[in-house]
Image (cartoon, rainbow, N blue to C red):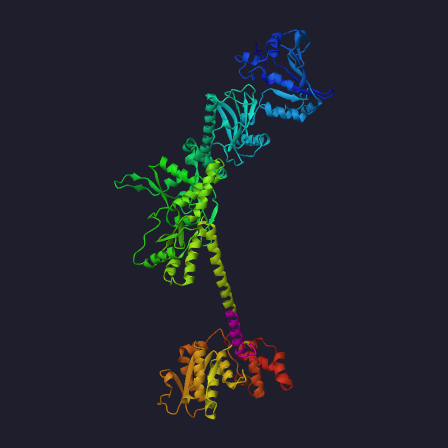
Amino acid sequence: MAVDPSFDRDHGKIDILTDLSSSPGRIIFRDNGLGMTQDDLESFQSTIGKSGTRAAAGDAPDVIGQFGIGFLSGFVVARRVEVTTRHWQESDSAQACRWENDGSKNYTITRCEKAEVGTEVVVELRSVDDRGLLHDDAVKGVIRDYADMLRIRIFVNDPGHHGQPANTMNMPWEREGVSDEEMRLDCMIYLEKSMPDSVLEIIRVQETGDVKVSGLLYITRTRVLGADAPRSIRVFQRRMFLCEGAKELLPPWATFVNGILNTPDLSPNAARDNFTRNENWRRLRDKLGDVIVAHFERLREQNPERLSEILAYHDLAIKAACHYYDPFFTKFGHLLEWRVNSASASVGRAERRAGRRVLSNDGEIMAYGWATLPDIISALPAVTNESGSPAPRKLGCFTTSSSANQYFEMANAAQTTVDASYPFEDELIKKYAEQHRDAVALVYVDREDDPAVFKELDADVDRSVAQLARAMSTLIRAGGSGRLRVEARRFEPPTLHAVLKDTDAGRGVRKARDILNDPNATPDLRTMAEEMLKMRMNSDIRMTINAASPLIRDLATLNYDDEDVVDLMVGVYNDAILYNQELMPPRNAKLFHEQFQRLMARGIGFVRQRDELVSERERLAKERERHKPAKSRPRDHLVAFLMTPYTEEFKPAIAGLRKLMEDEFGCELLIAADRQYQNRILENVRDHILDADVFVADVTGANPNVMHELGAARYGRPGCPVMLVNRRENREDAPALPTDLAGHIVASYPAEADSVAIADALRDAFRNHVTFSDELKNHSRQEFVSARKLESILGESIKLSADAFYTLSREFPTAGAWQSVQSDQVAALLGAEFQDLAPVILKRVQEATAHDRAV
């Protein structure tokens, strides 16, 4: 079959025209290709199984047909087909040929007129039921599905070619002169429009070597777990659609990858709806697997954050693939990322990927990081053997599911630890360690007593904790019919009171759960796994208590016969279970329920006791408030309470002490008779004591009332300064003091002296008493303005009654009060007789006290 060497493919076109004007309708296909001769129509068009395409394969390797039966598919919907064609070597338009057939064995070929080189096929529909096939959208949809890659322009009902072709022709991944980002976005848009699932990551395929394939693979956003799950893999052979859902074209581990691929290397079957599984197919499948792994390798070097996102999204699928397919694990195992404790130095690079979060037992959020095993191992401390040669580095790991809380908290205080507790991870980390046995040795911190983590007890210091462990083993009944085995060790941090260790039974349970989570597991395996889980409740539980924990050490000192102490032991066990999250069978749930019931009952008792204590406290507060001194106003000055007999012989001493305290120290001096706080004498004295800042006691003759008041002051106000004074008949006489006051410093004043002499006699003693004088010099307090001082200020020109002076002093007791008072306030206190003098009195007092302390 001759091929026109001058044919320009870029100018090739196919027109598809639909005609609904006739019943039931027809569709016309028209091209400007090579056309056919009458011999071609006889040899190929009319003979089943003979292919002109195959005959011309040597001259046109990109053509599609192969078996010579494709044209017959038209008669599925056609009652009649007419082919009009003019060969490119025919110069006479009248030498065109028309081939006609109505679906029978008979056909006709006649000469006809055709102005242009090419072929026109007219298909008349068999039934009106098929008219829906002729709608524009239906026709264009078929073109996009089957011929989108063909590099011949295809127009639908657009004979003038004013619009765009219905097919893409040049695919986004084939375009030149665009940036990588533009190509990525174009490919993303094309896939989202063309494929039924969403795209997570694009992998461009362009292989031109021994295996020829181009197109796009993409990591899907659909999480596919089962190997038999439907896939979105679209295959084109020589740019013409071949089949859909061809998951065998990719390696069996690539369940998370779909794509659109074009290749000349596949051999279609006769129906052209699939391909032959031959050596070319195997080579193509392996090559595509290498392309996927190579893309991950590039991401690791160029965009590690993106790689981490993909690994996190398809974590289970990728690790399942590594578990079931050793060749894939060999290529990909070094790229897997693992949860590692946040305090580990190996997390550095993996901080790019935010870990899910777990709670530490003190309530703080503790994040973990992600890292590859090569990164983790390279950051471990170097190890040497006895000869000094490098030895495998020790990598801590745990495989107990839901135990990240306790083991990561321990690891942050001790060493690098990897969480390998999720499905498939136990086997994968073991497989990696076996493949790299010269570089790493695994230490299972949840199974082994690693001396780097669990340190032996000190026989003397930790004896009580060892006894506590034995007691807990005896007294605590674990969930199920198994028993709790408790041992004591020292480990970090001390805030972690106890941890649960893994056992053979626990590892069996995890394998059973992995089987139940595996969609590829057989029914028999699932039944065995379910039975294993039922048997789990009868296995022993191993717990290690922490001798470094203050709580455990305190618990070890208590009486084990006390039911409350046993409840605390159970609480330690329950806390370990909660932190482990794994061991929660019905029996353990019942233990929690019972203990919480007891705790709630005690809590109710504690609440009642608290309420009773609150009520008692409120009653005592009211009682104190009732006995509080009844002050008429707040005061800013110092008050001294004088404890003295009231007989006539002591009046000079009282007057002298007033002169000294009030006129020289600015401190108001009160005796019990000056101010009545309470109706009863005893309560009135008590309130004076409560209100005073300092005390002065005249212990002359050890008057019983004075001694009683002095004792009350020293007991009730132990921090207040006390000044003892005593009257002496002779200067040489020592004061006669009770035994309790013997040795105390006493200021003496002479007998038969007036108030002025008494003040002079006591002045130095008061000033030399450091504690007493410091309080009197308290600059945060204002000076007291006594009635006697007011009388002195106003002098002889203004004569007021003694009651008036006392009233003014009581209402305005300090220099600061006089500086802020108004004359009408003073007038209101003086009454009608003296109110006119208020402005004069106020002015004189303000001038006289302007320089007093705290003004």
What secondary structure prevails in the magenta region?
helix
Residue 751's quadrant in the figure? bottom left
Place of residue 372 in the rendered image (x, y in percent of width and height, measured from the top left): 42, 39
Place of residue 70 in the rendered image (x, y in percent of width and height, measured from the top left): 59, 17
Place of residue 503 in the rendered image (x, y in percent of width and height, measured from the top left): 39, 46
For the point 30% across and 39% down, the residue is 390
Q: Which residues are magenta?
A: 612-633
Report if residue 716 lies within the magenta region. no
Report if residue 616 lies within the magenta region. yes
**Would you say 271 lies left or right of 428 here?**
right
Vertical placement of 145 versus 855: above or below? Answer: above
Q: Is residue 399 visible?
A: no
**Foreground of the two, 385 or 702:** 385
**Would you say 138 lies left or right of 748 here?**
right
**Would you say 15 lies left or right of 371 here?**
right
For the point 32% across and 39% down, the residue is 392
**Would you say 440 lies left or right of 275 here?**
left
Vertical placement of 318 versus 779: above or below? Answer: above
For the point 58% across and 21% down, the residue is 150
Place of residue 720 in the rendered image (x, y in percent of width and height, measured from the top left): 44, 77
